[in-house]
Image (cartoon, grey):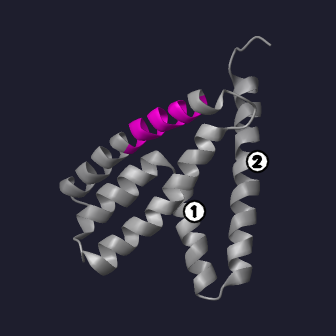
Amino acid sequence: MMSVSSFAAVAIGGALGSVGRYWLAHQVNLLMGFSSIAWGTFSVNLIGSFVIGFILIALQEWLHAAAEWRLLLVVGFLGGFTTFSSFSWDTYTMLITGKIGLALLNVLANVVFSLAGTALGVVFARWLLPINH
């Protein structure tokens, strides 16, 4: 059930995750040097993917935590930090349950359609917005 406390947990976690993503990506880019390789984003995605696996297992199997903790840490914080973590967990779950073809399709579809969506957004923005090139 969606309650005020559920929304608050997601909102607080999301705000903290977004700020964490911005800070960490910036620090990594400073360390590695700004280049055509998105080291900051790559680092955030890698860390977020690791953390979602760790946190979900910790919350579900070790702490037996209330649902609000999943909302705060997974949906909120990691959702704000990186949605790549959710994608990774979904794909991992498909792999360990023997749905290898579906996992591969999930990877391909997410990458291809996300890139296509980005390209479409750029084209649409350039068509709709008064931007000088």
Q: For the residue marked with disc 1, what is the amino acid?
A: Phe
Q: Which residue is mark 2?
A: 116
Q: Main secondary structure of the magenta part?
A: helix
Residue at image x 45%, y 63%?
A: 52
Question: Is 82 placed left or right of 5 in the picture?
Answer: right
Question: Is 115 placed left or right of 51 in the picture?
Answer: right
Residue at image x 58%, y 31%?
A: 31
Residue 1 seen in render? no
Question: Is 34 placed left or right of 133 in the picture?
Answer: left
Q: Which residues are magenta?
A: 17-29
Give 85 or 10, whichever is nearer the viewer. Answer: 85
Q: Can you give x and y, in whole percent of width and height, for residue 131 in the image?
A: 72, 14
**Element type where label 2 sits in the image:** helix
Q: Which residue is mark 1?
A: 87
Is residue 19 located in the magenta-colored stretch of the structure? yes
Question: Is 18 placed left or right of 114 in the picture?
Answer: left
Residue at image x 30%, y 56%?
A: 72
* Quadrant of the image containing the C terminus: top right
